Amino acid sequence: MNGRLMKDTMIHPVTGEILRRNVRPTTYRYKGLERTVDQPGWYPEDNNEGIFVGIDMAVSDQALYEMKAEYAASPKPEEVRRIREHLGLSQRRAGDVLGGGPRAFQKYESGDVAVSRPMANLLKLLDREPARLQELIDETKSA
């Protein structure tokens, strides 16, 4: 192999491994959100991380852009707490009645996990019409 870059192979600048063009599922995380994308790049035969150049980065940049937009549109932790308290629910009860499980609201309110769009919509509706919460409580009891 002459040179550092050939048509479909590349020599790793640190390890000297032969890298080949490939696409692999890669998960990116941002403030409690995550996206798994088909990430093009130069990869070794084993499962080590690849090297991304130029156009490869467009895929990860797009995933990050989408997660930032989703996070910006999500209710902030203090807003989630305010609505939950306005509804008179403990964190555990909110997770049971509204969904997400027993620790979901702890995670939302600490900022560890961003609120999903469906949950954000539900919270917004219940904040406007708290009396509708009883319908969900009754549904939970009958399930």
Image (cartoon, grey):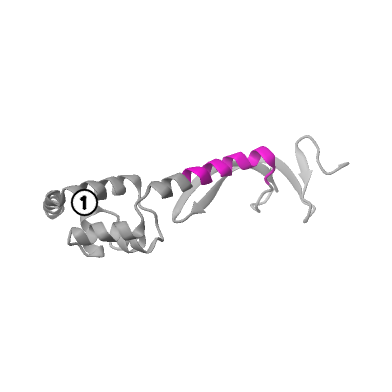
| Residue 108 vertical position relative to residue 123 in the rendered view, above or below | below
- For label 1, count other residues whose C-alpha is less than 10 Å away and answer few (under 14), some (14-19) or many (20+): some
* Mark 1: amino acid: Asp
Query: Position of 99 compared to 41: left or right?
Result: left
- Inspect the magenta stretch and tell me whether residue 55 lies in it: yes
Q: Quadrant of the N terminus?
A: top right
Query: Position of 74 compared to 90: left or right?
Result: right
Residue sitting farthest toward the top: 7
Q: What's the residue at 75%, 36% (across, down)?
A: 8
In this rendered view, identify the residue nearer to me: 113 or 13. 113
Majority secondary structure in the magenta region: helix
Q: What's the residue at 69%, 48% (across, down)?
A: 51
Residue sitting farthest toward the right: 2
Q: What's the residue at 54%, 41% (across, down)?
A: 62
Query: Position of 66 compared to 4: left or right?
Result: left
| Residue on which the image places disc 1 | 127
In this rendered view, identify the residue nearer to me: 3 or 120. 120
The image quadrant of residue 39 is top right
**Number of on-image labels:** 1
Locate residue 86, reporting x and y percent. Answer: 19, 59
In this rendered view, identify the residue nearer to me: 38 or 67. 67
In the image, the segment drawn in magenta is 52-67
Locate residue 29, reporting x and y percent. Answer: 50, 53
